Image (cartoon, rainbow, N blue to C red):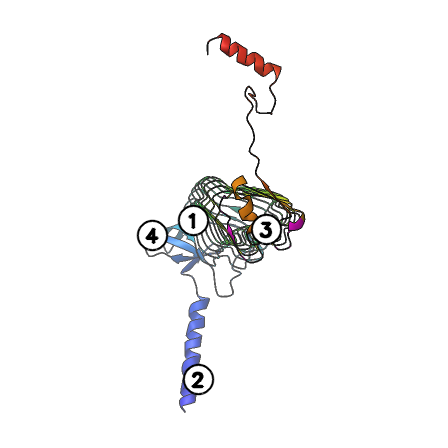
Amino acid sequence: MKKSLLQRLFTTLLLLAVTILTWAYDFEVDGIYYNKNSDGTSVTVTYKSTSYKSYSGSVTIPSQVTYSGKTYSVTSIGSDAFYWCRSLTSVTIPNSVTRIEGNAFSDCSGLTSVTIPNSVTSIGYAAFYDCSGLTSVTIPNSVTSIGGSAFSGCSGLTSVTIPNSVTSIGDYAFRGCSGLTSVTIPNSVTSIGYQAFYNCSGLTSVTIPNSVTSIGNYAFYGCSVLTSVTIPNSVTSIGSSAFYNCSGLTSVTIPNSVTNIGNYVFYDCSALTSVTIPNSVTSIGDRAFYNCTRLTSVTCQAKNVPTTGDWCFSHVPQSTATLYVPEESVNAYKSANQWKDFGTILPIVEPVSIQGDANGNGEVEIGEVTTIMTIMANGE
């Protein structure tokens, strides 16, 4: 008896839940579904039911909508609003919209075009996740943050414009965007999130501005055709595995602002031939240069020998490679674990300035002599 009562109660609650979930909107006008916002004057675009797939083809969202004699302003695109609408091809968003919420266009694999107006200030978590047909996106200057996983899995995305208004690139933001070939990060950005460009296997060029202070863990993991990276002096920390498996990376400049090179940072960067470690670095993490099989020249400017984690230089041809260090520290490096395994350890040779060598090419040329004599004749 008790079991039967519990079963009926469970069935009733289940039917109630299904009824609520399948009626996920307040009203519908011209094939678009809306929920009223708490202010009573605006609405959010939503979906029809738990089956999603509420929209297809080309959709133009109006800036205002009238229902039961009352006009509402359309101010946001709600969570999951266009989720899994795989036959959706294009969307035009009006200037009245200020917010695109999480998963708004997630898994819209047929979506090729999105017009985002200047009114939008935030792009939510996974907003365009797995929109594999999307080829290009221009993010307007009004946007200040790109949410985590916002464009993750957009494998067809070949170009993206990030405006100067954006201050942070969220975790996983462009993860798996394998068609993306170049990215310019504006001066407004201060942090690049965890796995932000993870497995962007087509990315050949990255410009990191002086505003960036931290590069997150796995930020450029698996960017296998990335050939060079210049890290600016503003960066103080490079996260674990930040450039892991960047097998096309041939050169990298680490600035004096960095004190620690984390675990696995350059793991499996098999094309890296030389690296300069600045005098600010005090420690290098586990397997930081593991399997950098072409690394033949390492310059470490630190007078105090940096501590090294396990297998820091494993599978590096140390026996035939050359390590350059400050002259007064040569003996210290020759006796330090892992550093002593370099076949050749030499002092860093500072360039010698030659009096009269105005252009710095190591020679005093006729033109330079003439210039100096003219200056002297003029009493300068």
Classify 372 as above or below 263: above
Q: Nearer the viewer, mark 2 or mark 1?
A: 1
Residue at the spot 61% in from the left edge and 14% down from the top edge: 366
Q: Is residue 113 visible?
A: no
Residue at mark 1 to residue at mark 4: CA–CA distance: 21 Å
Query: Is residue 147 located in the magenta-colored stretch of the structure?
Result: no
In screen coordinates, is 186 left or right of 318?
Answer: left
Q: CA distance from mark 4 to mark 3?
A: 72 Å
The kind of residue on which mark 2 rests is Gln
> Which is more N-terminal, label 2 or label 3?
2
Q: Which of the two discs, 2 and 1, labels the residue nearer the N terminus?
A: 2
Compared with 376, 349 (above or below) is below
Name the foreground residue: 149 vs 47: 149
Q: Nearer the viewer, residue 266 or 98?
A: 266
Mark number displayed over residue 41:
4
Tell me which segment is drawn in magenta: 303-319
Residue 235's x, y, as percent? 46, 44
Label 4 amino acid? Thr
Q: Quadrant of residue 373?
A: top right
Q: At label 1, which amino acid type do we have?
A: Ser
Q: Which residue is mark 3?
A: 340
Residue that mark 2 sits on: 7
- Mark 3 or 1: in front is 3
The crowd level at tag 4 (other Cα within 10 Å; few <14, some 14-19, many 20+) is: few
Q: Nearer the viewer, residue 154 or 290?
A: 290
Counting residues from the start of the chain, the first of labels 4 and 3 encountered is 4
Question: To which residue does mark 1 refer?
Answer: 122
**Residues under labels 3 and 2: Cα distance?**
73 Å
Determine if the magenta segment contains residue 305.
Answer: yes
Q: Of discs 4 and 3, which sits in the foreground?
A: 3
Q: Earlier in the sequence, mark 4 or mark 2?
A: 2
At 51% across and 65% down in the image, what residue appears? 51
